[in-house]
Amino acid sequence: MARPRKPRFAPLLAPFGDELLRVVRAEITRQLTVAVQSAVTKALRPLRAELLRLRRELAQKPPSTRPHHRGRPRSERSCAARGCERPHVARGLCKNHYQRLRYAERKTPQAPGNR
């Protein structure tokens, strides 16, 4: 049985076909990329406009007058200890005098029935 003949143009057409496929793929990818970029840009326009509006609005607002500390609200009362003008914290005393009072209470011996 005779062997089939090799086509003469097959070796020449194969690289041409491969190159053609590569160029077509690159062009399709480029077109898709351009289409995707334009869609993303179109979708981002309203977001950018909203961000600019918010930035302008925040720049026009005065800074907050609310204090930046956390915890319990501060009292208007001052410490009951003589000569101390610090703000009241507990039992009519400022934080320093209150801590002194607590320390003194812990160090004093208590009667057995008060425990």
Image (spheres, helix red, strand yellow):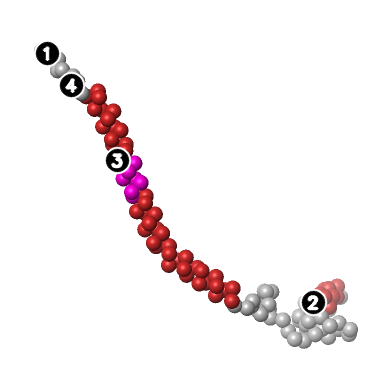
Front label number (2 vs 1): 1
Q: Is residue 28 magenta?
A: yes
Do callouts 3 and 2 mark residues in contact (Cβ within 8 Å)?
Answer: no
Q: Is residue 87 left or right of residue 58?
A: right
- Is label 3 in a helix, a strand or a loop? helix
Front label number (2 vs 4): 4
Q: Residues within 10 Å of mark 1 (few under 14, many from 20)?
A: few
Q: Main secondary structure of the magenta part?
A: helix
Does 9 sit above or below residue 73?
above
- Is label 2 in a helix, a strand or a loop? helix
Rendering coords of residue 91 (x, y %):
78, 83
Q: Which residue is mark 2?
A: 95
Q: Is residue 24 visible?
A: yes
Q: Residues within 10 Å of mark 4 (few under 14, many from 20)?
A: few
| Viewer-nearest residue: 92 or 36 | 36
The disc at residue 2 is 1
Q: Residue at x 78, y 82 (%)?
A: 88
In what quadrant of the picture does the C terminus appear? bottom right
| Viewer-nearest residue: 60 or 3 | 60
Q: Is residue 113 magenta?
A: no
The disc at residue 24 is 3
Nearer the N terminus, badge 1 or badge 3? Answer: 1
Rendering coords of residue 80 (x, y %):
83, 85
Nearer the N terminus, badge 1 or badge 4? Answer: 1
Do callouts 1 and 4 mark residues in contact (Cβ within 8 Å)?
Answer: no
Do callouts 2 and 4 mark residues in contact (Cβ within 8 Å)?
Answer: no
In what quadrant of the picture does the N terminus appear? top left
Front label number (1 vs 4): 4
Does 38 sit above or below residue 104?
above
Q: Amino acid at mark 1?
A: Ala
| Residue closest to the far right | 83
